[in-house]
Amino acid sequence: MSPLLRKSVLTIAASALALLFACAGPAQADSGVTDYGGGCVLDSGNRAATIDALRLRCTPDQQDLLFHEAAPGAAPRGVTSGWVVRPGYVQGIAPAFWIGKTFATGPDGGPLTNRVTGLDIAAWPANIHRGTALLDGRPAWVLDYTPSPTPQVHDEVREVAPGVWFGYSWWLGEVNTLLLTFVVATP
């Protein structure tokens, strides 16, 4: 084979391989799984795996990163289950006091109530609207607790996987204090 023909064949083969790998890349990206390492995985096709990872496997730094990378997503709607993520010592006792939220929202937000105690009592009303996250100054869904007994509470959430929102709960004051992080998800 002449050197010129050999160079042409190698160029074509290299181009074919590059095209093959380029096509394989997006397929992996389109799998709906984002792996942050150490079992911290967001799986758009598996809510339970995403919730488990957020609650038990993601470090605080990973949670902050995935929140920062997420867009606000759709407004939560309907009855959601909820879990406190951190601080860890609150995870075990939280279900006695809080089990999720019920959202009566449209595409631009609306009212919500918290689902309190195992009796599923509607309490602590709030309004959800598009706003800016205290954590990173980017767009998020903001839960305004002005109509509740604790108007100083400010929650912010982003949809990190379809039907799963991760958020931060703050106490607003001279210095805004992070109270906890949480997950809410539709069934």
Image (cartoon, rainbow, N blue to C red):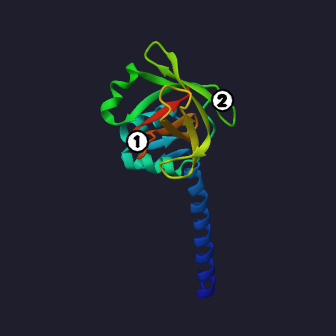
Furthest residue in direction bottom, as rendered? 3
The secondary structure type at the circle numbered 2 is loop
Q: Which residue is mark 2?
A: 105
Residue 128, located in which quarter of the rendered image?
top right
| Residue nearest the observer in this picture, 130 or 16 | 130
Q: Residue 169: image x %, image y %? A: 45, 37
| Amino acid, disc 1 | Leu
Around disc 2, counting alpha carbons within 10 Å, would you say few (fewer than 14), some (14 to 19), or many (20 or more)?
Answer: some
Query: Horizontally, is 174 left or right of 112 in the view?
Result: left
Around disc 1, counting alpha carbons within 10 Å, would you say few (fewer than 14), some (14 to 19), or many (20 or more)?
Answer: some
Q: Residue 145: image x %, image y %? A: 53, 31
Q: What separation in Å lies between label 1 and label 2 (alpha carbons)? A: 25 Å
| Amino acid, disc 2 | Thr
Q: Which residue shows up at 38% across the image and 19% down it?
A: 96
Q: Is residue 137 above or below residue 100?
A: below
Q: Quadrant of the C terminus?
A: top right
Q: Which residue is mark 1?
A: 178
| Residue nearest the observer in this picture, 64 or 97 | 97
Q: Quadrant of the N terminus?
A: bottom right
Q: Residue 170: image x %, image y %? A: 44, 39
Q: Which residue shows up at 39% across the image and 43% down it?
A: 58
| Residue nearest the observer in this picture, 71 or 14 | 71
Mark 1 vs mark 2: give the one in front: 1
Q: Specify which label sits upstream in the sequence, 1 or 2.
A: 2
Q: Residue 60: image x %, image y %? A: 37, 46
Residue 3, located in which quarter of the rendered image?
bottom right
